[in-house]
Image: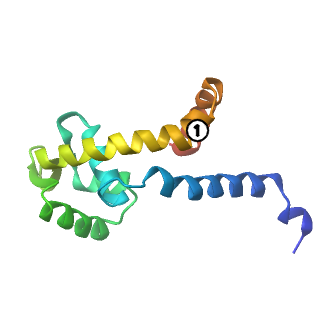
Amino acid sequence: MKERMLNDDDVTLYGLFVEAFSRLKPLVHEDLGVPDTWFEVLLRLGRTPGHALRMSDLAAAVAFSSGGFTRLADRMEEAGLIRREPDPDDRRAALAALTPEGEKALDRALSRHLAHLRTHMSDRLTEEDRRAFERVLRVLRDGDA
């Protein structure tokens, strides 16, 4: 292996990103009251006008295959957190909608999540750092979009 590639600044930068995320994720998802994958679904639905999204769009947003997301949605529906509804714009599609119980679960999880975010992330950054970090993350997220 080439020593130069092993110590490349780009490799180091990406490694720091992965290490930071790996360290922070369990801390900010601690004690949510629901599995973190469920929390991501509830959060996406809660932040969407009407609190409903097409199943396929929701699966893509939380980075699940359609089959994997269907199983996840089945479990969340059994728990009473979401319900499936027909998509009024496309008879072939279904919407996942937040239930009142799902809203309560999201409220409980969000209060814990925010406290953890502030303790382990936000409070450690200056306002300038936060703005720069958000800008960089949006650039990386949007990529070639």
Visible in this render: residue 99?
Answer: no
Q: Is residue 133 above or below residue 53?
A: above
Place of residue 129 in the rendered image (x, y in percent of width and height, measured from the top left): 65, 30
Residue drawn at (35%, 51%) of the image: 40
- The quadrant holding residue 93 is bottom left
Left or right, residue 75 beside residue 113:
left
- Is disc 1 surrounded by few (<14), some (14 to 19) or many (20+) residues within 10 Å? few
Name the residue carrying label 1.
139
Which percent across, then down, holds residue 23? 58, 57
* Furthest residue in direction bottom, as rendered: 1
Tell me the residue at 22%/50% (across/down): 54
Foreground of the two, 49 or 99: 99
Corner quadrant of residue 130:
top right
Image colouring? rainbow
Task: Report the front residue among 65 and 79.
Answer: 79
Q: Which amino acid is tagged 1?
A: Val
Residue in view at x 55 percent, y 52 percent: 24
Q: How many marks?
A: 1
- For label 1, the SS is helix
Going by the picture, which residue comes out furthest to the top? Answer: 127
Residue 96: image location, x then y, percent: 18, 52
For image coordinates 55% across by 35% down, the residue present is 122
Q: Is residue 61 visible?
A: yes
Left or right for 52, reference 134: left
Q: Is 56 or 145 nearer to us in this picture?
A: 56
| Viewport quadrant of the N terminus | bottom right
